[in-house]
Amino acid sequence: MFKPNCMRLLSLVFSIFILFFIIGCSTEEGSGTNGEQSEDGVTQITYWHNWEVGPGGEEIQQSVAAFNESHPDIEVEPVYVAADGGDSVSSKLVTAVAGGNPPDVMLASRYGIAEYMDSLTLLNDLAERDGINQDIYYDWAWGESTFEGDILGLPYDGTSRALYYNKDHFEEAGLDPEDPPTTIEELEEAALQLTKQEDGRFTQYGLIPWLGEGWLYSWGWSFGGEFVDDSNQVTANNPKVVEALEWMTDFASEIGAENVLSFANSEGSEAQDPFISEQVSMVVQGNWIMEQIAEYNPDLNYGVSYIPTPTGDDFTTFLGGRALIIPKGVEGDRLEAAWEFVKWLSSTEEGQRFKEIKGEYSVIPEVNEELFGDIPNHQPFLDVLPNGKHRPVVLAGNMMWDELAKAPDLVLDGQGTPQEILDRINETINNAIDQEEARRE
């Protein structure tokens, strides 16, 4: 029979064995990353994205193949991950980081990444080491990828907005199809001329301000408003933003708020998009809609112009897009490989040329001129890209988006004046930011 001391020794040895077994399993699972180094010295990394098929999927596959070919010591594996909602996969990333098994690189919407920055590797040191800075990019691309001096990711692409108009509708209404409106007053006049009714029923709308990409962001910036101040405090009730919302809702009321709300709430997409199906003569839309027009109504005779402003100058555009991020826990050779991939896709002309496939804009000005400079309907977008605006990078960016999107409906539903609605929204957002800052302290 074993003596007590022997029993204690065996127990200690068994405990040490179990501990090493757990550590070994953790290491095999990646200890914070899916990537690994193969026997031949090639570092393998995973790349999460949510563009499975279509031009977006093709862009992912071609860009990864080109990188792998030009970097024989790194092998990137693209992995499709379904979005949580919109184009975000942030909750899946947070879960993966918490579980110790995130991807090495992820493609993410830029404006919301500050809200889960605790799950990211900050890129300041790597960027400084390799000379990656804002001088390479448009201001909106760099600005939306950073938060309070921290580089959360590198910008990947740009989506812009402009005024699309139906040239045939313009001719039928006696308007010059080569002279679209540039002021808000001209826009109103043209919209009323283009609106048609038969037997008390609207058969064609000249304009519904918030259809398509006519968000309060789009019009607020065109009216000269700002959504944050110099101290990064949210200013959704900025006087010019209030003025924009007043115009949007007053114009809708002029042609019948109930009819406009009913039509807007039944808005279709793709072939049923109201501009593509020629139910609406003018709309603020994104550059990507050109691809859908070519697919679903290739005979549509349309033009593209700047989003009108009160003065007919100082044109701007609302820019969105994605960033390439490296999750927390990616270390060593995999971190260097992930950074090399992110850097190549974001900051080199070679990596950015693949934007041509999906028709979205590069974050590097020189690349856009080369890819799209000779295509007429792209020119209004290219003209305003240097002056473009990005959504505020704040700790409640997703909430801010949701709240502002509801504002026109709330006003038309009689729940308050534009000033009252935006005052309430502003208070709600700033309170949420204060709570998140307190949680982080």
Image: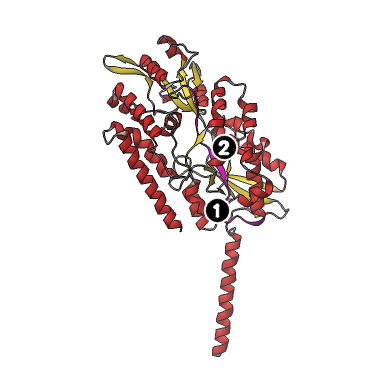
Q: x%, y% of residue 187?
A: 41, 19
Residue, x 34% and y 32% (percent of image)? 408
Q: Is residue 329 magenta?
A: yes
Query: Does residue 96 sit above or below 415 in this rendering?
Result: below
Query: Does residue 47 sit above or below 58 in this rendering?
Result: below
Towards the viewer: 270 or 340: 340
Query: Does residue 226 sit above or below 430 in this rendering?
Result: above
Q: Quadrant of residue 437?
A: bottom left
Q: x%, y% of residue 177?
A: 47, 13
Crowding at mark 1 (Cα within 10 Å: few <14, some 14-19, many 20+):
many
Q: Is residue 51 magenta?
A: no
- Tell me the tag on residue 139: 2
Identified by mark 2, the residue type is Asp
Q: Given this view, does label 1 or label 2 mark the residue nearer the observer?
A: 2
Tag 1 residue: 102
Query: Does residue 392 sit above or below 201 in this rendering?
Result: below
Disc 1 from disc 2: Cα separation: 30 Å
Instruction: Give the secondary structure at mark 1.
Output: loop
Q: Quadrant of residue 267?
A: top left
Crowding at mark 2 (Cα within 10 Å: few <14, some 14-19, many 20+):
some
The answer to whether residue 266 of the structure is visible from this angle is: no
Identified by mark 1, the residue type is Pro
- Tell me the tag on residue 214: none
Q: Taking 264 as reference, is 31 left or right?
A: right
Q: Taking 278 as reference, is 50 left or right?
A: right
* Image: magenta residue range: 313-332
